[in-house]
Image (tube, coloured by chain):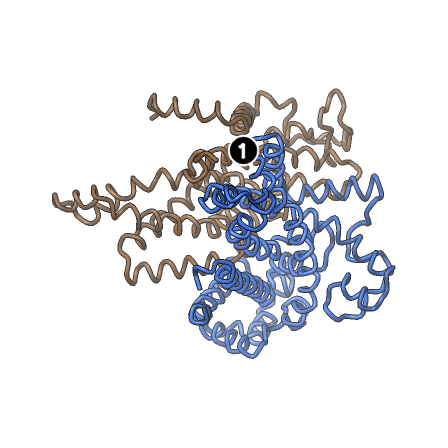
């Protein structure tokens, strides 16, 4: 177990080097010139301003020198400064990450609460109307365009019915709680401010549901097929023939084994949820890293693009690592 | 080439799986609408009619009009002309690229495999939409760059799948037999091993088609797809954001994406069930 994890962690090094290289190549070897975005067309036509600018940001160095400088700084936790607003990218990411994590965590909780029971019921009542309904729900979940679902939700529940608040993390003029975890809902509870808790929770509901659509669909179908496979195994038949009650067969014998593939997909979903927040965050004006990634991409702010893609890739890779470790934990045969 | 057996198999599959049948009918419907768009659309999708702008759905404009007085129905009908070929192009190019890389890695093994699969790992480490967005933005927002960006994120999964297939196919006895009668390594890989990997790889690609349409629409929604005036579904949804009360501007193009993607997923779901031998067993 330990050797397995150590091996996986050592393998992370070439992976991270590769990731940083790809991120670097994307943000540098491209036809669009970030200077146009940063300086504006008028200043770009002045060669002196351009030369000064290039020298200041090290853009006149050969690419490999720029890359090595970047990696050197990276190892010291320095992700460079945004070309657009000159702020350190690492600070910005630290500021935006909790909002995204709160949203993704809420979505993954919904995914587990809805998707897993739906998948289990679907498998147990295979080929009945319950199964069919749950399959259609899961297929709708993976088919609905998230940006459209978000707009639809806002239109119905905010604009028309007024049941839920509009975009943003808090109501207008509401002061955010003191930062402990960066999750507004949790921090509000820690402050004992229930008014604030309700406000932040209300704002979280709709974007979390929208974001959870795809992963819920995915988890439902994975749980269903995992359960179906397990239910066909001999040990389930043995358990039944011992005269165990059906719910006990399901909960003690079938479900734990069906959980193995489900947990894998769940972990991967959490990774994609963190990244998949781009569209959701834009529509809900949610100040997270998805929105940050979008703004820096369109502004060609390459230190920011590199920082955010690397951060998200790193989270993705770490989540995978945790999933693999969980796998070993859940399946004693692998120990 | 469709053999009788293929047709029989398809009919039996669709008969036994109602969802897949509904999906197939919907896909076919959308393909017909897309091909016949110039005949079916009541108006020119680009024609602006400022006098009639922002009209709610009515008898002359069934889906209403947008902020420039363009007919939403006609634009929705024409939208498939971008999304369908774009998704097809992405999947085909990515499948080609992934197949070559996966086949070389799986067949030759050794250092080739190590290098190619590590490169694949790196690209898989990036979440789809983030990488596609960064690439599309860097190359400059237009239709062909959106497709290039999607290919960049799409090929690695195919190269992984094809490598796995090649690894198992090359152990077959017919490969050994061809080698024994003097086939060259190149011939073995391209003419013997690969043709036997193509069918499962194609199925994977089909399952992915709906997803490609979704991501393409997403890029386009972000303004990283075709030009602003183009009748493209994702773009049309984003046009509607500023006209929140005129729900029809976003609602109908979104519904188009949704129904088309769902249709592909219905078919894909049925295919997956039919092909997964583990689920065939009776319980």
Residue A195, horizontal then vertical, whole percent:
87, 59
Which residue is disc 1 drawn over? Answer: B266
Residue that extends furthest to the front in the rendered view of this protein: A242
For this view, does A67 lie left or right of residue B76? left
Q: In the rendered view, does A155 fall on the left or right side of B4?
A: right
Q: Residue at x 43, y 23 (%)?
A: B12
Among all residues in the image, which is located at the extreme left? B181
Residue A300 location (% of width, % of height)? 59, 60
Indicate the quadrant containing the N terminus of chain B: top left, top right, bottom left or bottom right.
Answer: top left
Provide the letter of the chain coloured blue.
A
Whether residue B1 is situated above or below residue A160 in the rendered picture: above
What chain does mark 1 sit on? B
Q: Nearer the viewer, residue B40 or A180?
A: A180
Up/down of B208 relative to B120, above or below: above
Q: Colour of chain B?
A: brown
Q: Position of residue A230 (x, y in %)?
A: 49, 45
Q: Residue at x 31, y 53 (%)?
A: B106
- Quick check: can you spot residue B231? no
């Amino acid at each position: 177990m330990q050797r397995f994890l150590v091996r996986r962690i050592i393998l992370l090094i070439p992976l991270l080097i590769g990731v940083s290289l790809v991120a670097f190549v994307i943000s540098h070897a491209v036809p669009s010139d970030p200077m146009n975005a940063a300086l504006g067309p008028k200043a770009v036509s002045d060669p002196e301003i351009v030369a000064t600018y290039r020298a200041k940001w090290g853009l006149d160095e050969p690419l490999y020198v720029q890359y090595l400088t970047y990696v050197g700084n990276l190892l010291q936790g320095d992700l460079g400064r945004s070309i657009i607003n000159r702020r350190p990218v690492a600070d910005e990411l630290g500021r935006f990450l909790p909002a995204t994590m709160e949203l993704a965590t809420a979505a993954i909780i919904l995914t587990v609460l809805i998707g897993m029971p739906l998948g289990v019921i679907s498998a147990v009542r295979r080929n009945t109307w319950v199964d069919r309904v749950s399959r259609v729900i899961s297929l709708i979940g993976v088919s609905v365009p998230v940006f459209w679902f978000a707009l639809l939700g806002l239109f119905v529940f905010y604009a028309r019915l007024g049941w839920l608040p509009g975009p943003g993390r808090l109501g207008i003029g509401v002061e955010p709680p003191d930062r402990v975890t960066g999750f507004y809902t949790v921090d509000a509870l820690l402050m004992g401010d229930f008014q604030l808790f309700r406000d932040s929770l209300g704002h979280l509901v709709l974007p979390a549901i929208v974001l959870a659509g795809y992963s819920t669909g995915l988890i439902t179908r994975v749980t269903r097929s995992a359960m179906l496979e397990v239910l066909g195994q001999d040990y389930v038949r043995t358990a039944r023939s011992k005269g165990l009650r059906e719910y006990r067969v399901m909960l003690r014998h079938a479900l734990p084994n069906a959980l193995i593939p489900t947990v894998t997909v769940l972990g991967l979903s959490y990774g994609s949820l963190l990244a998949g927040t781009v569209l959701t965050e834009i529509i809900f004006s949610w100040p997270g890293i998805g929105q940050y990634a979008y703004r820096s991409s369109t502004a060609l702010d390459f230190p920011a693009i590199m920082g955010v893609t690397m951060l998200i890739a790193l989270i993705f890779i770490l989540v995978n690592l945790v999933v693999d470790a969980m796998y070993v934990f859940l399946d004693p045969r692998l120990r | 080439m469709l053999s009788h057996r293929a047709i029989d198999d398809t009919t039996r599959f669709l008969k036994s799986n109602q969802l897949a049948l509904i999906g197939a009918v919907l896909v076919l419907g959308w393909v017909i609408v897309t091909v016949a768009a110039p005949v079916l659309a009541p108006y020119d999708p680009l024609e602006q009619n400022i006098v009639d702008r922002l009209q709610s759905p009515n008898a002359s404009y069934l889906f209403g009009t947008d902020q420039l007085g363009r007919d939403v129905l006609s634009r929705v009908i024409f939208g498939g002309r971008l999304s369908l070929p774009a998704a097809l192009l992405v999947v085909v190019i990515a499948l080609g690229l992934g197949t070559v890389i996966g086949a070389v890695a799986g067949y030759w093994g050794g250092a080739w495999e190590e290098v190619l699969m590590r490169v694949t790992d790196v690209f898989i480490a990036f979440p789809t939409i983030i990488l596609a967005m960064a690439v599309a933005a860097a190359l400059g927002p237009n239709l062909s760059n959106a497709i290039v960006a999607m290919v960049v994120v799409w090929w690695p999964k195919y190269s992984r799948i094809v490598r796995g297939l090649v690894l198992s196919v090359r152990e077959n006895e017919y490969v050994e037999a061809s080698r024994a009668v003097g086939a060259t390594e190149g011939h073995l890989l391209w003419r013997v091993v690969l043709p036997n990997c193509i069918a499962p790889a194609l199925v994977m690609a089909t399952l992915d088609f709906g997803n490609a349409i979704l991501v393409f629409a997403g890029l386009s929604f972000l303004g990283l797809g075709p030009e602003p005036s183009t009748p493209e579904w994702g773009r049309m949804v984003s046009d509607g954001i500023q006209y929140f009360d005129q729900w029809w501007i976003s609602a109908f193009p979104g519904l188009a994406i949704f129904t088309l993607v769902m249709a592909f997923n219905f078919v894909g779901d049925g295919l997956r069930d039919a092909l997964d031998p583990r689920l065939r067993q009776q319980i």
